[in-house]
Amino acid sequence: MSADPAARPGRLGVGVVGAGRVGAVLGSALRGAGHPVVAVSAVSQASRERAATLLPGVPVVDVPEVVRRAELVLLAVPDDALPGLVRGLAETGGWQPGQIVVHTSGRFGVDVLAPARAAGVIPLALHPAMTFTGTSLDLARLVGCAFAVTAPAPVLPIGQALVVEVGGEPVVLAEEARGLYHAGLAHAANHLVVLVAQAAQVLRAAGVGEPGRVLRPLLDAALDGALRAEDAAGGDGPGAITALTGPVRRGDAGTVQEHAVTLAALGAATGAVDVPTGYGALARAATSRALAAGLLVPAEAERVLDALAGINAAPGALDPQDGTGAAPGRDDRQDDGGTSPQEDA
Ligand SMILES: NC(=O)c1ccc[n+]([C@@H]2O[C@H](COP(=O)([O-])OP(=O)(O)OC[C@H]3O[C@@H](n4cnc5c(N)ncnc54)[C@H](OP(=O)(O)O)[C@@H]3O)[C@@H](O)[C@H]2O)c1
């Protein structure tokens, strides 16, 4: 066997366009899988440092030169920059027939690569469903990570094989499904971060010095429960919502009312009006989903929705002094007797 990895059969010379969080890490992973990285582009200091750390020894050159040297071009640039970059390289004759061109954007399928495809490239959209730090920590996270693969049918196996080579799990996705797919991932991963930020602020206001230590076991258990319930349902039935616990799940309208008022007061005092409005929107969603799943009866759902009535009408508009009247007391409702790690959250 040749000592030069590029000379071994099936190895592709990889050019990384954009040594950002994703480009540097995926380039390193492809290198680890035996594909030599032949060139990388990096202008900012952060990108140059990532290239030096994750792709040591790889020549840093400009974008057209990366593309000129590569058999597999990895485009890992901001979503908004991608269409112009592909078009610009087409206009200057940068693409080569037979070259594999991969982009990592979640939002786009392969249509965005049309100008390169017209020049004869093999287009692949490979999106890792992962959040990247741009450090070597991410390499281990690629193992078992789902990658959405969108490509013309004849070349789908190339995309799937590349994903498997870096330790990922390919999930084939239609071009027209990319928008929904990416919205679903962003809603889960990005808004989970917002939820933690809001909850941590509320706990700090309550005098909890290290909210993360309080939240971590609870959120680990809640996330695990929801994902297990979703997996167990396998697409049939209500899925994740069956793992819901807490006051909405119990139909505890008095507690929900108190939360609404307390959070409205916090919002009014601190300006964090996103906390009560966020709580209101999610509690309403929890109620309607719990009702649809048969976890609440209509009368319970109605009482919970009544308790939330004012919370989104005008941020911070709930009167903190008016927190006890509207909601029923504990004696007014059925008790499901449930307990779980989430119950007291
Ligand atoms: N971050 C994530 O967790 C994640 C996860 C999955 C998929 N993705 C997708 O992966 C892609 C890259 O995201 P990222 O988070 O790695 O971005 P990033 O960290 O901001 O890095 C972007 C890279 O692109 C380069 N760049 C910017 N504009 C360019 C242009 N017009 N031409 C050439 N290079 C350009 C930047 O170079 P300089 O720094 O030198 O300017 C930088 O190296 C995006 O499509 C994103 O949606 C991201």
Image (spheres, rainbow, N blue to C red):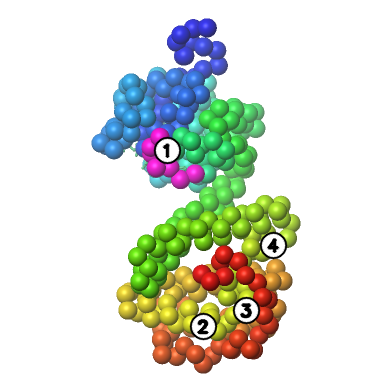
259 lies above or below 124: below
Counting from the top left corner in percent of width and height, residue 43 is at: 28, 34
Q: Residue at x 45, y 27 (%)?
A: 73
Q: CA distance from mark 3 to mark 2?
A: 11 Å
Q: Mark 4 or 2 closer to N-term?
A: 4
Q: Is mark 3 within 8 Å of ligand 1?
A: no
Q: CA distance from mark 3 to mark 1?
A: 43 Å
Residue tagged 2: 257
Viewer-proximal residue among 22 and 93:
22
Residue tagged 1: 137
23 lies above or below 65: below
The residue range painted magenta reads 130-137
Viewer-proximal residue among 57 and 249:
249
User: Which quadrant does ligand 1 occupy?
Assistant: top left
Secondary structure of the residue carrying tag 4 is loop
Residue tagged 3: 251
Q: Mark 4 or 1 closer to N-term?
A: 1
Q: Residue at x 52, y 44 (%)?
A: 129
Residue tagged 4: 238
Reply yes or no: does residue 134 show up in magenta.
yes
Q: Mark 3 or 4 closer to N-term?
A: 4
Disc 3 marks which amino acid?
Answer: Gly
